[in-house]
Image (tube, rainbow, N blue to C red):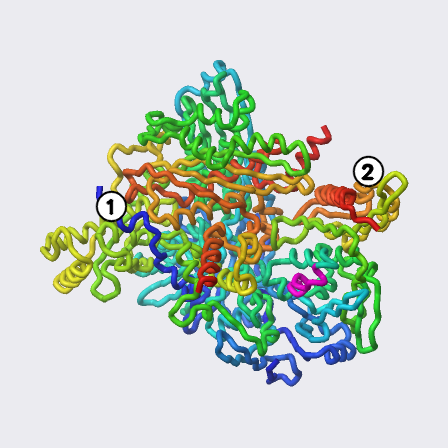
Amino acid sequence: MSHSSEDGGKEGRGKCELSLTVNGKPETVRVFPMERLLDVLRQELGLTGTKEGCGEGECGSCSVLMNGELVNSCLVPVLQAAGATLTTIEGIAEGPQLSALQAAFLECGGAQCGICTPGMILGACHLLNKKPEPTLEDIREGLSGNLCRCTGYMQIFEAVEQAARRRASA
Amino acid sequence: MRSDPADYELIAPGNLQAVLSLLADEPGEWLPIAGGTDVMVLYAAGKLPARKLVSIWNLPELRVIEILPDEIRIGAGCTYTELCEDEIIARDFPLLASAARWTGGIANQNRGTLGGNIVNASPAADSLPALLVYEAELILVSGRGERRVPYLDFHTGYKKMKLQPDELIRAICLGRKFSNYLHYARKVGAREAQALSKVCVAALGRLRGGVTGSVIDDVRIALGSVAPVPLRLTELERIAKGKPVEPELVQLTRKMTSAAIQPIDDIRSTARYRSAVAGNLVAEFLEQLRGSGKTV
Amino acid sequence: MTEEHIIGKSVPRKEGRDKVTGAARYIDDMTMPGMLYGATVRSQIPRGVIKHISFDPQFEWSKFVVVTAQDIPGKNCIALIGDDQPCLADGKVNHPEEPILLLAHADPHLLRKAVDGVSIEYEPLPAVFTIEDSERGSQIIWGMDNTLKTFLIAKGDVDSVWAKADYIVEGEYTTGAQEQLYIENNGVIAAFDREQGITVWGSLQCPYYVHKALMALCNLPAEKIRVVQAETGGAFGGKEDYPSIIAGHAALLAMKSGCPVKIVYDRLEDMTATTKRHPSRTRHRTAVGKDGKILGGEIDFTIDGGAYATLSSVVLSRGTIHAGGPYYWPNIRIRGKAVATNAPPHGAFRGFGAPQSLFAMERHMDRIAQAVGLSPVEIRRRNFLKPGQTTATEQTIREEIDLGKLLDRALELSDYTAKKARFAEENAVGPIKKGMGIAAFLHGAGFTGSGERYLASVVGVEGCADGNGTVRVLVSSTEFGQGTNTVLCQIAAEALDLPYEDVRIAQPDTNQVPNSGPTVASRTAMVVGSLVRSAALGIKQTLIAGGMIGGSYSPEEFRAACRLHISEHGQLRSYARYEAPEGVFWDDEKYRGEAYASFAWAIYVAEVAVDLSTYSARVEDFVALQEVGKVLHPVLAKGQIAGGVAQGIGFALYEKVVWQNGRMQNGQLTNYIMPTSADLPPIRIFFEEMGNVHGAYGAKGIGELPMDGPAPAIVNAIEDALGTRFNSVPLLPEDIFNAVYADGER
């Protein structure tokens, strides 16, 4: 991992410089090691698409991909993300072209108020990466760490199924 | 977010030796943090007493699964996802695989570690009853060397355990001797996913032919969330061995289960409910054992 | 009739792209130069006198903005209906988490520590925590006798029915508090400027409610208060009146400091300090004839309002009016009462009193069925309201609704009869017991009685010349997931025969949009939509009258005509104001008449499995069939029903607020249990459309309807499965265990 400390003498105290790759772009931040990855993404890097819903790893609104694995960024101290490759919602679309998942969420009504949507799309992305042809059970289980209060999940499932079909036929 | 990051130190030496040196030099000063799924919740709530943390996340020495002919050794830094996805664990230790799948959602499974689950020692931890019935042994490591201890009496009280201030758990060892057992586990939470358990049961059992029919050859039953520590029902196991699985035995085990556990009323559930459900699940296990055909 | 080309189609959500790309900006995504963070010091006790406030000297308090009740320029109250709720406690507190003092600082971490650095000494007073405690009156905590409000609905001659009854059936039913649990916590940013006054950006449902509250609090005229709704991450009623409080707090801090101030709650603060669904207790006493027909009855409907009146009178009103369900009551007396307790005031949550009283009604129908020896299906069939009959408030049902047929369809869709028979057999063996349950109900959308007339909503539509669309809808109605933006643009597009893409909607900003009323009561599509249509047609008429277009035109021609008109006249705007329909009367004194312009009707059927090894109930299948006038947007409509049913399932089986001395103990998502994707059944949704003369394109309001049915359908199914009677929600495994265990011991 790549980081260097400054200030205050003893290693570990004070801010340190960390490098990480976010949505394909190398970033360097000067932060306290115990800042939450969520806060570093939102405040240092201005990537406000990742949301805080609970701060306790229950709602999944803060989900991002860290080295390809879905994690709750509210529970990751930023030091542990040093050198990591991160994907947030801002990195899901391919430029102006929406991903199959994003398009499916739009068509199927998978987003209502939208606050859970970034985390939900990351969760669905992670699921489809691991299981490109998920059953409904797989989808239910795969998204069980992402809470949605608006949709009752039905149209989210439809969106994921549709995206899976489209990705398969692409 | 109810803590100020400026008040905390976190370092990541990057290898086990360096971490152990730190713990040896300053025992009790540095809280090891692996995936953070417990520590960071306390931290965000403003309830983390520790101010100095040392990261043991992704230490290569801790994140291996060693497969030996007679046992497997799971690195304490392995995540629940790694446990779920390992074929040998799924086949030989299905109760550990299922516990891993039941712990939190996918995102938390990608970060939570087996070692963390043990050391956090929540009475409701999902994997601990499985470790009890599989008779896990822990390899503890420090600057002074390694020692291997049975998991059975590792927890001495609520959040107290036989771990020295300069020690970490390096690996969890499970003997590969349960292939002809019935493996049973059930977790009862407030909902199907992402739920702290109200009661959980892990059990193994095997029959053998007797004079008048099958009797219990070996049985191990462990429960979580019904005492300050995960419990092995050793007394009940002793009584049950050699007996046929009949209504009388099942009734007796219900009584003994009730007597052995110390469930409480808390924000999630009640003592009476936990007691009744624990009895039901143990009975269900025995019923399944009777019909299982799993014999010596 | 002309074919509709946009209404009835699932056009893309207007703000959908921003939501799926993370571009949508919610309050906590926004910052301003020089912005401070604000926080609230809150009461730790349920009731008492504040003796002393001390500030820990380790903090440099001169560097903090500190606001107390003494700093309030206007009236220390949250102006809503009764105005009894202070903005900041002044000497006395009446509920845990009551706001006492506000702090602001640029460093949010230091601010958090400073909140803990304020110590408050109280002289506690005895407090009241339940409806029964409140009624007992040994402590008077509000008014003369703790009663916030009462209503009486009386029809016919109830006292005469008891003697003629073949059966008299009694029952008492209770429902607990429920947290709205929008995934985005409450948050606002306020700025103050001596010239312009106060501007507040907020996560909120009703910009004009906040506007009104700030006028009174800050002692500023209307034109010096501006409220702007930001993208809002869920609301469900929880951001109907509460935002006036948090906005007031931020405004006071902004006024005192001269800096913008952001206040965003974390989950614990939001759950413990803000509004919840009113707990309720309903008592039924019903006279029934031998044939199962209701002769008459009395219903006592009581809700726990918490410490201040806030919205309780309106919740009570709706719950009281709906208490008789979709049945014909020749004689009825309904007494509604809201009482005060020392809990944070309860407030609006989808359904707004109706889920509570309808839970009781539908449980009670099953009880009546048992008493009379009829099935739950038959008892309902014999008592359903028919066209031409009157409701409890003597409103004549004018539409040709056939609830019997609706019931038949629901039974068929759910395979009710066959499953019930199969379960009766299968339940004999094994620990899994299955059952089927029905709920029949109605929901009146829009404000009750004279409410809409009182609101006098105004809607605007304007032509655009800025190249950003052809027309723009101007409403204060807010989007928070339910589809306001999309549906209102659809309506305008349909009315003007323009492509959906050509219609925009303005951000709800009180400087820019008229007051189209609050975004509540399932009124937006139906009432506001109607006005949007009128206002849109007004634009068209203006252009036609000006000779700029003919009766039929292409979108390009329309756009050009708008530009031309604007270049000549400066602007092109049309407003429509709500007018009460003819022949619709409501008597506020007698609480009698046309309570709602129209009702939506529904039959829900739940299939539930109870596992007696764990006493857990799971909904295995759910059919939601409703008559909604017109489905304006199939995907959105289905989404509303699915989401509402999910919340209803939570209300029934999972969501319990654990109270201790008036304070919620389980204010985190770990311990307040909301259903995950793994918990919900397939929710199968079906619509019927009978039209609605009072709603845009025939629509009836549907946002709240789905909240009313799931809880009673599920508990009816559990009783069917176990043969055990349950009268309360939430119904947790521990409750099922207690009842089954008690049954077993007998």
Task: Say the numbered circle drawn on residue B246.
Answer: 2
Which of the 4 quarters of the picture holds residue C628?
top left
Task: Name the amino acid, label 2.
Answer: Glu
- SS category of the residue bearing label 1: loop
Specify whether residue A62 is in view. Answer: no
In the image, is B293 to the left or to the right of C376? right
Name the residue rendered at 41%, 73% in the picture. C33
In the image, is B71 to the left or to the right of C554? right
What residue did someone put label 1 on? C3
Name the residue rendered at 46%, 40% in the picture. C624
Tell me residue B151's x, y (percent). 81, 61
Q: Are marks 1 and 2 in contact (CB under 8 Å)?
A: no
- SS category of the residue bearing label 2: loop
In the image, is C531 to the left or to the right of C393? left
Specify whether residue B61 is in view. Answer: yes
Chain containing mark 2: B
Q: Which residues are magenta?
A: B80-90
